[in-house]
Amino acid sequence: MACCATAAIAEADVWANALVAERRRLAGELATIPGIEVVPDPQASFILLRTRAGRVREALRDNGFAVRRGDSFPGLGADWIRVAVRDRPTSAAFVAALQQLMSKELM
C-alpha cells in the first residue's frame, strides 16, 4: 500500500526525472574521455561503456568504485563495463578517477 500511495508515486516520478537528467549529464562527461566508448541513448539506471584499455575495472575497484563487468553478458567482452548512475558528487568523482586511469592506460 505504501508504494502505491499518491505521495510514493509522486516521489518516484521526481526520482525518475532526476535520473534522466543525471544519466544524460554523466554519459556526456564519460564520452569526452579518450579511449571510452559510451553506448548511445541509455534508457536505464546504468550506462554501458567500452573501455578499450587493460585492467580498468580492477583499477576502478582499487580506487573505490565498483562497476559491473561486461563479459558476464552474452556478446560483450572484458573491455565492457556497466556504470550505475549515482548522485552528482559520486558521478563526478567516478569520472575524475576514470579520466586519470585512462590517461595512464593510454600512455
Image: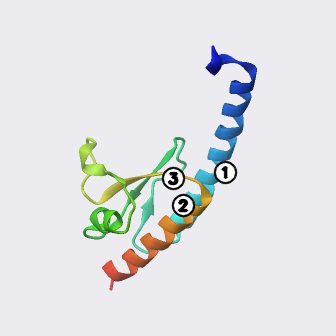
Q: Which residue is mark 3?
A: 40
In the figure, 74 relative to 39: above or below?
above
Q: Nearer the viewer, mark 1 or mark 2?
A: 2
User: In the depicted view, which residue is nearer to us: 32 or 94?
Assistant: 94
Q: Going from the N terminus, do you reach mark 2 or mark 3 first?
A: 3
Rendered residue at 35%/55% (across/down): 81
CA gap between label 1 and label 2 equals 13 Å
Tell me which amino acid carries mark 1: Ala
Rendered residue at 25%/68% (across/down): 55
The tag on residue 91 is: 2
In the figure, 16 relative to 24: above or below?
above
> Is 44 on the left-hand or right-hand side of 101?
right
Tell me which amino acid carries mark 2: Ser
Where is residue 10 drawn, in percent x and y? 74, 29
Rendered residue at 52%/47% (across/down): 42
> Is 32 on the left-hand or right-hand side of 97?
right
Q: Nearer the viewer, mark 1 or mark 3?
A: 1
Label 1 residue SS = helix
Rendered residue at 48%/47% (across/down): 46
Label 3 residue SS = loop
* Quarter of image, res 101: bottom left
Where is residue 50 drawn, in percent x and y? 36, 60
Where is residue 96 drawn, in percent x and y? 50, 73
Q: Going from the N terminus, do you reach mark 1 or mark 3 first?
A: 1
Q: Categorize mark 1 by other alpha carbons within 10 Å: few (<14), some (14-19), many (20+).
A: few
Q: Categorize mark 2 by other alpha carbons within 10 Å: few (<14), some (14-19), many (20+).
A: many
CA gap between label 2 and label 3 equals 18 Å
Q: Which residue is mark 1?
A: 21
In the figure, 98 relative to 7: above or below?
below
Where is residue 67 drawn, in percent x and y? 37, 54
